[in-house]
Image (cartoon, rainbow, N blue to C red):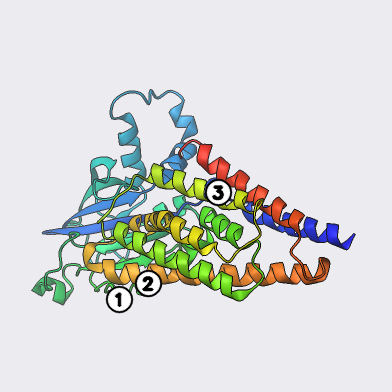
Amino acid sequence: MARSMGIAVTALWMMIFLATAAAAHTADISSSRIVPEGNGHYRVDVGFLGTDIERMFAENKKELKDIDLTEPGVIEAMIGKFIQKRVALQNEEGQTCPSTVVSVGEDPTNPYDSKAILRMDCTAVPGQIFYNPFELLKAQGPRAKHLVSIGEKDDASALTEAQRMGREPAPGQVMIYPGDSLIDLSKPLLSPWQLAPKFFAAGIEHIMTGYDHLCFLLAVVLWASRAWPVVKIVTAFTISHSITLSLAALQVVNIPSAWTETAIALSIIYVAIENFFTRKVEGRWRDTFLFGFVHGFGFASGLIEMGVPQRAIVPALASFNLGVEVGQIGVVMVVVPLLVLIDRLFFNGQRNLRLVQICSGVIACFGAYWLFAPPA
């Protein structure tokens, strides 16, 4: 009875843990680049994800009934209005700068984003100017985050006199969340290294909500009961995915996301099915080393989605990668001791075959879903 209960409890835990993984993970990250154009005029480039567009259409179902979305430019115009209503330059009293939509389309510098370009005229708005993207964050949901950058992407020039005096925004970045304060454009934003803790936190969140990556890690440690094989598994995975994460983030290698997602799904299915045929974990570091190269491109998507400028890529990459490592080590340190505890409580200190097969079967099913599910 105890043995059956142990199997049922652990299998249930696995299914609850994976139940939210219907579509792998979404970063819920948007970005803005504010470029001063002189005399109170600004260009604001807003990068956003496909999920933001889905929410827009969900919010406007009634208005869409009589609109022919196949007409050229209709969808782009709707998206432009959606973004325009949700970001603003304003003064402390809430008076907003008039804005116009310049263009809406794919972001040529970021394969994961779409981009809306707005121009804002603040010449008639008195007082200090603040940036307010919080309506866009609200549309993204409670896990939303927004990376704000000042200046052109490759601008690493010294501060101008106007920037030093606070009359124009100084180059920099800041990561903001729902509930943060408005961004005062007279104050310098964070330097790349000052922003590192935010990227570290984003790396942890990426692995903790990256259900595809978590499924892979869970599958390879289901037979593990000793520390040394787990150390080798995690170390091999870390080395290989760090290589491809760096190559992708530095734009040395660019692989279509559809290929990466397919390869990650296949890797999950492979390691899950392998659990039915072997209990040996000593050599599984080879699996994690090989498939880690593929998962590195998946991790890179979370960093690339933030639109990190090249001058900030080194601290961002280092801190984001460290966050991913801390997150996955934390997962392994919870899962493996839990499996060992279940062994002792229900199976006389031995790993139960049926337990591993049930958990592996659940993981393989999710891998198959991600493999065959239509792209979002």
Which amino acid type is marked by label 3? Tyr
Identify the residue at image location x=60%, y=57%: 219
SS at mark 1 in the image: loop
Query: Please, is residue 348 above or below residue 7 in the view?
Result: below
Residue, far right: 1
Residue 199 appearing in the image? no
In the rendered image, which residue does mark 1 sit on?
A: 193
In the rendered image, which residue does mark 3 sit on?
A: 270
x and y percentages locating residue 339 in the rendered image: 70, 67
Q: Residues within 10 Å of mark 1 (few under 14, many from 20)?
A: some
What is the number of the mark on residue 117? Answer: none
The mark that comes first in sequence, 2 or 1, is: 1
Q: Residues within 10 Å of mark 2 (few under 14, many from 20)?
A: many
Question: 162 or 280, which lies in front?
Answer: 280
**Disc 2 vs disc 3: which is toward the camera?**
3
x and y percentages locating residue 261 in the rendered image: 44, 46
Identify the residue at image location x=79%, y=55%: 8
In the rendered image, which residue does mark 2 sit on?
A: 319
SS at mark 2 in the image: helix
Residue 153 appearing in the image? yes
Q: Is residue 153 left or right of residue 345?
A: left
